[in-house]
Image (cartoon, rainbow, N blue to C red):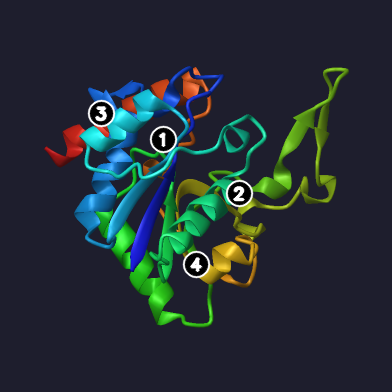
Amino acid sequence: MNIAIIPARGGSKRIPRKNIKAFNGKPIIAYTIEAALISGCFDRVIVSTDDDEIAAVALQYGAEVPFVRPLALADDFATTGVVVTHALNWLIESNSKPSFACVMYATAPFIRAEILKDAFATLKQNKHKKFCFGVAEFPSSIQRAFKITTHGDVEMFQPEYFNTRSQDLEKAYHDAGQFYWGTTEGFLESKGMFSSDSIPYPLPRHQVQDIDTPEDWARAEALYQVMLKQSA
């Protein structure tokens, strides 16, 4: 059995009601639910939430909401890891232990069903691995990154690379914030995602956008509209 777990608490602060806010005409969580269902990878698509309105939207778009997430796991300090552990333990106690689970974020409208399928196939082909998750390359070399100090000065994190050509610097990647395939044992053992237990699944940069602020939201909507025009 394979399970999709979509964490979606109700108390988002920077973008109020973020998980069900309208994104190009429908609640943003709908994109994640629909990608999971279309992929055909899952026996169950479960939304973990503490919020009645989010639960109603999730049900409307075809997901299950078989439990109410405890309030202690729905505050600003609850990590995705503890939310996923709670969901998996609930499934185990219900005699529905999955072999694989995929954690998918509710605010990831660029998730694609075909990528979910391919990433899952990649994980299954590598039986010694615990996880496979989406990554994207940083657009600029992180070795030449700098900060602005409290005094307003510019200070490089790694000044030894100031004169190094960009083509000679090592590529770096970041978590795409979309999906995390893993074995149930891997999640329950709290195996590190950024470790040798994982397979990175590179995604095109134009299909990746973190949505944490109103500016992020506006950029994601604009990018999504461009993608729709290109595919029309």
Label 2 Cα neighbours within 10 Å, binned few <14 / some 14-19 / many ≥20: some
Q: 4 or 140, which is in the foreground?
A: 4
Viewport quadrant of the C terminus: top left
Q: Is residue 125 above or below residue 141?
A: below
User: How far apart in space, not on screen, are marks 3 and 4 (Cα)?
Assistant: 36 Å
Amino acid type of the residue that numbered disc 1 sits on in the rendered structure = Thr
Where does the image place residue 206, in percent across and percent down from the top left?
Answer: 38, 42
**Label 2 is placed on what type of residue?**
Val
How far is disc 2 from disc 3 in space, using C-alphas? 35 Å
Residue position marked by numbered label 3 in the rendering? 225
Of mark 1 and mark 3, the one earlier in the sequence is: 1
Q: State the residue lying farthest toward the front.
A: 94
Other residues around mark 3 within 10 Å, as few (<14) / some (14–19) / many (≥20): few
Q: Is residue 170 visible?
A: yes
Q: Looking at the image, is mark 2 or mark 3 earlier in the sequence?
A: 2
SS of the residue at dot 3? helix
Q: CA distance from mark 1 to mark 3?
A: 16 Å
At which x and y percent is residue 84?
A: 52, 51
For residue 184, the mark is 4
Q: For the point 41% across and 54% down, which residue is it?
A: 203
Residue drawn 62% across the image and 35% down it: 72
Write down the residue under mark 1. Answer: 107
User: Residue 205: percent from the left, percent from the top?
Assistant: 43, 46
Contact between labelled residues 4 and 2, with CB atoms less than 8 Å apart: no
Sequence-earlier tag: 3 or 4: 4
State the residue in front, 120 or 146: 120
Q: Quadrant of the N terminus?
A: bottom left
Label 4: few (<14), some (14–19) or many (≥20) C-alpha neighbours in 10 Å = many
Name the residue that disc number 2 marks: 82
